[in-house]
Image: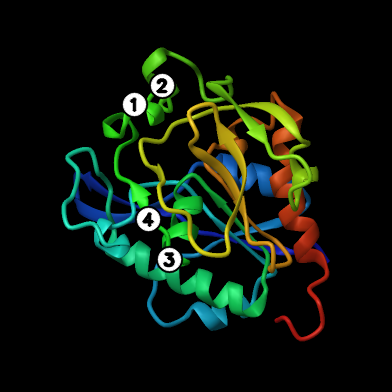
Amino acid sequence: MKPLIAITPSPTLDTLPHGTFLRYAMNSAYVEAVLAAGGVPVILPFQDGHAGPLLEAVDGLLLSGGGDVEPARFGAADIHETTYGVSPERDRFEFELLGVAIGRRLPVLGICRGIQVMNVALGGTLLQDIASAPAILARIGHRQQESGLGPAEVGHVVAIKPAAPLTELFDAGEMGVNSFHHQAIDALAPGLLPVARAADGTVEAVVLPDHPFLVGVQWHPELMFGRHPTHLRPFAGLVDAARSPSEGER
């Protein structure tokens, strides 16, 4: 059977003629990428206290992109003026999901916001706005839409660390990625290993070496794989890891 891959959505408040409604939204590219990698995507709505039974029913977890993590979660006393889309409900849900997934050694892929959730949940911190950070972290653009670049185009390159765990997902050396984020990892969480960085030092990919498959990337491979097939590899890695969970890990 094809593995079931759970994907977390974003909250959106939509005003329609018959009322205003909280909805769950997600770019269909996540679904398309999981399908292309051989998995079966399943969307998980936010809910408290059900991470255990939800993850019991699936084989892997994908933490999607979206709004910013609540700054208080990583000890920030102030909220930067550019911080947006904070959803305490989503934070609670994804942090609970990630904790259960790590405990059960369930394969996890985090994209954009997802890598940031991983870092904060495991004890790290975030830069609330890269452009407001010291100059060394602001020499390249991380929001390529402001330069008119499309979602499948390369915004900058990242350097993949040689001989790092799971390097086969990307190949060592330089690789072009897209970029649509204004926040990034600051203090790296204990246990996480950075395996890719941008030219300005920004952490662009991490793994948890003691976990069968826990990978976070700061870019959006789901928007690139159609034009650049290498970017399907994170999804293929997630699906492959989800096919045969080790005995006692579920």
Question: Residue 93: percent from the left, percent from the top?
Answer: 41, 69
Between the residue at mark 4 and the residue at mark 2, the CA separation in whole angstroms equals 21 Å
Between the residue at mark 3 and the residue at mark 2, the CA separation in whole angstroms equals 27 Å
Q: Is residue 118 left or right of residue 169?
A: left
- Determine whether the residue tagged by mark 4 lies in a helix, strand or loop: loop
Q: Is residue 136 left or right of residue 55?
A: left
* Nearer mark to the viewer, of 4 and 1: 1
- Which residue is tagged 2? 139
Here the colouring is rainbow
Look at the numbered discs 1 and 3 and tell me whether their residues touch, using CB distance below 8 Å. Answer: no
Q: Nearer the viewer, residue 43 or 194?
A: 194
Look at the numbered discs 3 and 2 and tell me whether their residues touch, using CB distance below 8 Å. Answer: no
- Which residue is tagged 3? 123
Residue at 56% x, 83% y: name it. Answer: 53
Q: Nearer the viewer, residue 137 or 101?
A: 137
Find residue 210 and name its label.
none
Dot 1: few (<14), some (14–19), or many (≥20) neighbours within 10 Å? few
- Determine whether the residue tagged by mark 2 lies in a helix, strand or loop: loop
Look at the numbered discs 1 and 2 and tell me whether their residues touch, using CB distance below 8 Å. Answer: yes
**Chain-order first, disc 4 or disc 2:** 4
| Residue 164 versus residue 50 in the image, above or below | above
Question: Residue 195: percent from the left, percent from the top?
Answer: 64, 45
